[in-house]
Amino acid sequence: MGAAIAVACKDPAAAEGLFTLARNGCRTPAAVLRLRTEFTQHGVILPVTDTTPSQPENTQSPS
């Protein structure tokens, strides 16, 4: 994990990829915010405009 964080600190694409992977466990907007805060505390810069939902919406097809 340390190596991935070190790369993410230097490479924006790696940072986004690592954040996307880590975000899979987030179920609420607050959890995504906590994750973003953790990344910042480790020196990983993320785009401010990330509006991707933490989890795909469950959609049902009409019957």
Image (spheres, rainbow, N blue to C red):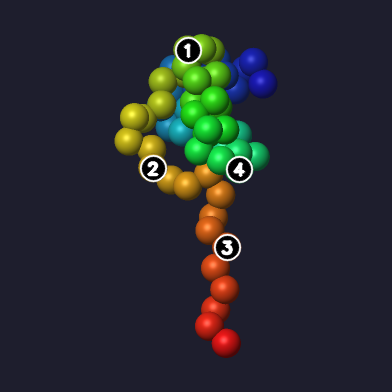
Of mark 4 and mark 3, the one earlier in the sequence is 4
Residue drawn at the location 50% of the way across and 20% of the way down: 37
Q: Nearer the viewer, residue 61 or 47?
A: 61
Q: CA gap, disc 3 to disc 1?
A: 33 Å
> Which amino acid is tagged 3?
Asn
- The CA span between labels 2 and 4 is 14 Å
Q: Secondary structure at mark 4?
A: loop
**Which residue is identified by label 2?**
51
Residue at numbered disc 1: 43
Considering only order in the chain, which callout, 2 or 1, is on the residue closer to the N terminus? 1
Q: Cβ–Cβ below 8 Å for labels 2 and 3?
A: no
From the viewer's perspective, tell me whether residue 41 is left or right of residue 47. Answer: right
Question: Are the residues tagged 1 and 2 within 8 Å (C-beta)?
Answer: no
Residue in the picture at 67% in, 21% down: 1
Compared with 22, 10 (above or below) is: above
Considering only vertical position in the picture, is 17 above or below 52?
above
Give residue 57's position: percent from left, percent from top.
Answer: 53, 58
The quadrant in which the C terminus is found is bottom right
Give the residue type at disc 4: Arg
Instruction: Tell whether label 3 touches label 4 (CB within 8 Å).
Output: no
SS at mark 3 in the image: loop
The residue under label 3 is 58
Nearest the eye: 33 or 45: 33
- Looking at the rendered image, the disc whose residue lies closer to the viewer, 4 or 1, is 4
Query: Visible in this render: residue 63?
Result: yes
> Residue 6 is drawn in which quadrant?
top right
Q: CA distance from mark 4 to mark 1?
A: 24 Å
